[in-house]
Image (cartoon, rainbow, N blue to C red):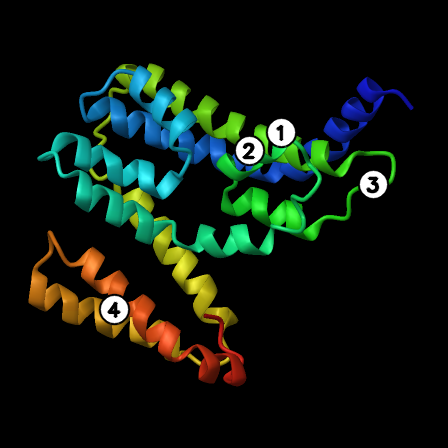
Amino acid sequence: MNKYSTIKRSFLAAFPYTIPILAGFLFLGITYGIYMNVSGFSFIYPMLTSMVVFAGSAEFILVNMLLGVFDPVQTFLMILMINARHLFYGISLLEKYAGTGIKKLYLIFGMCDESFSVNCSVDVPEDADKGWFMFFVTLLNHTYWVTGATLGGIFGSFISFNTEGLDFVMTAMFVVIFLEQLLKEKNHISSASGIILSVISLLIFGPDKFIIPAMVMIFALLMLLKKPLEKGGAAV
């Protein structure tokens, strides 16, 4: 089997696993592009940020940061805390990404929750190459997000309905993620801790500055409780 045939088979094997992600990424991407547009940015901004940043929650948050006072330290810390889970993703994929050659650079850059889930859970078909399979999963998901964000940015200017509250889509998404995690837990120590520490941080630091202190406190507490939670079967 020649190289190009292997690449083609790897693409055809990867594509079906990304179809459910296609629907979600297009919808959220278009929403993000429209949000950027109605916030005063041309379609170039959502197109470039979706290409370069490629972190949905971070990109929504960046809209307000771009409109506010320039604060690189706060931006760095907030994005780091929001995407800190990728540190653990990366550690768990060290062995999986071994032997993928130069493709490893893009696999690291383009890793998102959905690509991580597919690449970790799917058994690569025997007639496909593991490295190319994971590469195409990552590339397709990245392409879906960039396409949705660009389309939303382009057609956002033609939106005639009231878009007030459109940014709430990310709040809704986080609520859904939280509820799914809550249902998976055997006990709710970690979830309850997150809520309580967030409220405490909100009362101390106010609505504009509570997120980073809250996430730092939650992270520190969960590290302290890691072993007890693992013994109790809770998701950390």
Q: Are marks 2 and 4 in contact (CB under 8 Å)?
A: no
Q: Residue at x 44, y 77 (%)?
A: 226
What distance separates the C-alpha of mark 2 from that of mark 4?
Answer: 32 Å
* Residue identifier under label 4: 217
Q: Earlier in the sequence, mark 3 or mark 2?
A: 2
Dot 3: what SS? loop
Q: Is residue 166 visible?
A: no
Check disc 2: other Cα within 10 Å, few if <14, some if 14-19, many if 20+. few
Q: Position of residue 170 (x, y in %)?
A: 32, 45
* Residue identifier under label 2: 105
Front residue of 146/167: it is 146
Front residue of 154/233: it is 233
At label 4, which amino acid type do we have? Met
Q: Position of residue 105 (x, y in %)?
A: 55, 33
Work out whether 166 lies above or below 82: above
Q: Quadrant of the C terminus?
A: bottom left
Taking the image as shown, residue 36 lies to the left or right of residue 85, namely left
Q: Residue at x 21, y 29 (%)?
A: 162
At label 3, which amino acid type do we have? Pro
Check disc 4: other Cα within 10 Å, few if <14, some if 14-19, many if 20+. some
* Residue identifier under label 3: 125
At label 1, which amino acid type do we have? Ile
Q: Earlier in the sequence, mark 4 or mark 3?
A: 3
